[in-house]
Image: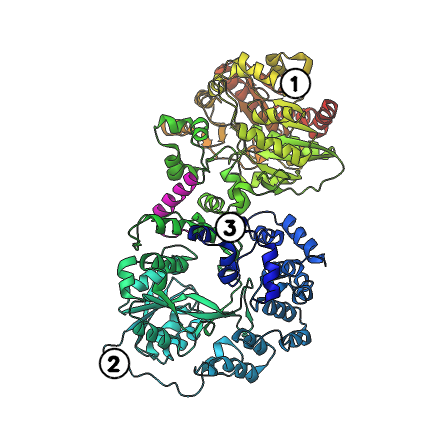
Amino acid sequence: MSEKELKQLTNIFDPDWYLSRYQDVANADTDPLAHYINFGWKEGRWPCHIDAVAMDDEMWADGDVSGAYEGLKLIAADNSSRFRGLASWFLCRWLASWHRWEEARIYVEKMLNDSNLSLWVKHEGPFLLAFSVLYKCNERPRALALINNSQWTSSANKVLAISMLKTNGEKIQTLNQIYSANNLMEIDGTSPSIDALRAKGVIPKLETRFRDPLVSVIIPCFNAAGTIQTAVHSLLNQTYTKLEIILVDDASTDNSESVINSLIKSDKRVKYIRQPENNGAYMARNKGLKACKGSLITVHDADDWSHPQKIEHQVQFLKKHRKVKAVTSHWVRSNHKLEFESWRMEEGWIYRNVSSLMFRRSVYRKLGFWDNVSVNADTEYYLRIQKKFGSAAIGEVLPLLPLSIGRVDSSSLTQNSITHLRTQFAGVRKDYLDSAIEWHRKSKRLFMPQFGIRKFMSPPLICRGEHKVRLDNLKRVLKSKQLFDANWYKTVYPDVELANVEPLTHFIKFGIEEGRDPNPVLSLTGLAYILGERHYDAISKWATDAKSSKAPDSPDGTFFLSVKGERPLEDYNSILAVAHLAGQELYGAERSFIDCLRMLYCKSNNIYVVLPCGVNRSYINEVKEYAAKIFFCPLPWWHEGRQEFTEITEHIHSIIRHTGTNIMYANTLTLWEPLIAARKCNLKTIMHVRELPNHDPELCKRLNATPDQIRKHVQSNSDHIIANSKATASFLNIKNKTTVVYNSIDTNRFLGDDHASQSEKLNVVMVSSNTVKKGIDDLFEVAKLAGLHSENINFYIYGPESVDLTQRLVKSDLTNITYCGYADEPQLAYEGIDVVLNLSQFQESFGRTIVEGMCCGCVPIAYNWGALSEVIETTVGYLVPFKDYSRVVDILLKLSNDQIELSKLKDKARINAITRFSEKEISEQLSTLLTFSQ
């Protein structure tokens, strides 16, 4: 440090900050300034708080970088700032890490021309970074001029840069300057490519003796047919020959096995193990570790190349230093054309190769196997050795000389976004190593078994091994990160408490597969839909990635599970439409919701949608046709006595602020938290009531409420109410804010189709959920009675294969009933049908299947109660007393025997339904109501 530099740094040195930042200095009880001058400056420590440094830290953290990025740009543009060069270095390095070369180019001269930069960056990194940027921007003359800059002192890194400006043999000759200058063998090659590299001339094989150690080299490979020969040949051509090379094929699907077999035939030192299924590189390493016989053990990647003397130097180091337990070498990363790079520029391109670790068998006996994860287990093993045997237990051979060349592969895990090397600062790799180091700190015995429950938590996304091991790890992570809410789970899923099962245990064993939600704001099935993955894979990714629990998708930092719809935003009224169901099988509620979305969109409304789950992908895709955006959020049903889930309320509140909607449309009376959130935002709410609780004891039981309590819930949580029939409006009896708007039917689904029966028999259908409540017993009774009078009446059942239906089909010997399964498209249930039945045990609030059947030209027959008496006019169908099976059969017999009357009624039914319940008619009422409610 020059006297001028000393004075500059002393003037800004902050002893209190220095001690608070560097705890080791504080613990040493030494003078902070003396420590900085003698050691800290050389070690790259900072003398005081520097805004640019804090911003750089923020840039590599996991979150929104825009503020730090703009702040660094301001500093870099301030010619009066002593930190402008430092800020330029930070910006250039960060942009280059993302391959944003043209943007990084802006800061090259600002970085190199700042005289103060050497105060902060005391290595050749800025020169290498500038060279990389110029090279990537195809500015070769400028790159050459940089090479000739006298301020860039000679180094192996600089020689690598010079070689990149050479072609063919000159490139190899330049690389040899590194090796010859350090008394290493020169290399040769027919072309400047990793795969063409070989030793120059005859390789001088070292004479080995009986007592010389056997070195086991483990090479895990997966679909490495194109690179494995390069890796193995570089090992077979080592000067140290006492080797066994164990190739562990991790269930490759290319012709790797064929290539490996040819290598086995060429040299008996090559051995082969094939994994029956793909389990990852570290499990493959462990398989090789279990089988190896060497007293020294190392690994080698299947796409890398090693200098002929690499093994020799590592062995000699360990022979010379008996107390050292392991040794590494250094390497450089390159593409196949020997163009060198580093994803994040530090001191140079050449750095320690942790994957080249060679260790004694005694280490294996003490510490066991590599951790079974996807990334970073080699670093964990390295740190485990240091923790067990001390920091001096690992040596390095020929530092800053590239004894290996690692192939850069854009598809490798190091380039994958969620496991990218940048996550060592914040993300998967850092979380993993933090957890590993904590285990190292707490455990006295650091032995890692090959199989069994993990010793420490791993980010679930990179956890490998048996399914039970990964489930146990996920359980620990969810608990540790407080991502699972046991109270929520018990409240929303009462069967869990009834089964007396610990909630998190139930979620891990059953809930994930069943698509249950772990907390009030995460829809697991919505997450799986967005990611396009299985439930387990989706929640593993969510629990791994810190962004998933706090990503700033909105101004207040709320994390939204959302997908864009297919409708662009216009300068229209914006509506937030909230649904209570989106199940795998669609019923009236889901179909009516789609109908309303379509009608509202056609009336020039921007529609944002909140769905409670992502189970039915085809349904979601249909919703997307009319939505600007879809949000997924758990929406538990209101029931009397339950507490509000304030997390859901706040989440919906954030969605409202994010979307700027004018009004909330709630699809049912079972919603609660969305309506509370709307009131907090002074948003008008419309509740669409489609239920008759006074005639639906099952609904009352589920809501733990009397009809009167349900009515009060509706009144207190809505500004305006849409009743889907006069019967519903009569139950509500809230005249000052209730409007009757019948459910609509998308008549376009039915128009143009020929639904006429081609059979001489009368075909009758019932479409329902096939429960006792929905009249399945009544249908069997009608069919039984009809069979006694005629063989010309057939009954067809559509809907889910419910327990009630299955029991009756098993017990029944009726030949006139056919179960047809679930119809994905409603019109399919009515093809060739003459009569549609509704024999519901409770009063319907509308009767959607009746109207759909009428649209298809089916004559309706239903019990004369509820809203069905409004839907079925006597001129087009029949209303019969409740459970009057004989009357139903009489009508069927009459229609079966009078084809002319049947044909007339079918035509009338179709015209009546299309006229009264078409979207054209209903959309006018709906749109007018929503506009008026604002």
| Front: mark 1 or 2 | 2
In the rendered image, residue 352, in percent from the top left (x then y), is placed at: 45, 67
Q: How is the image coloured?
A: rainbow
Predominant secondary structure, magenta span? helix
Task: Give me the C-alpha separation between circle 1 and circle 2.
Answer: 107 Å
Residue positioned 36% across, 55% down in the render:
371
Q: Is residue 355 visible?
A: yes
Q: Quadrant of residue 246?
A: bottom left
In the rendered image, residue 341, in percent from the top left (x then y), is placed at: 55, 68
Q: Per the image, is 479 magenta? A: yes
Residue positioned 76% across, 37% down in the render:
571
Where is mark 2, residue-wise? 209
Residue positioned 64% across, 63% down in the render:
116
Mark closer to the chain start, 3 or 2 = 3
Badge 1 vs badge 3, beta-carbon distance below 8 Å: no
The quarter of the image holding the N terminus is bottom right
Magenta region: which residues?
463-480
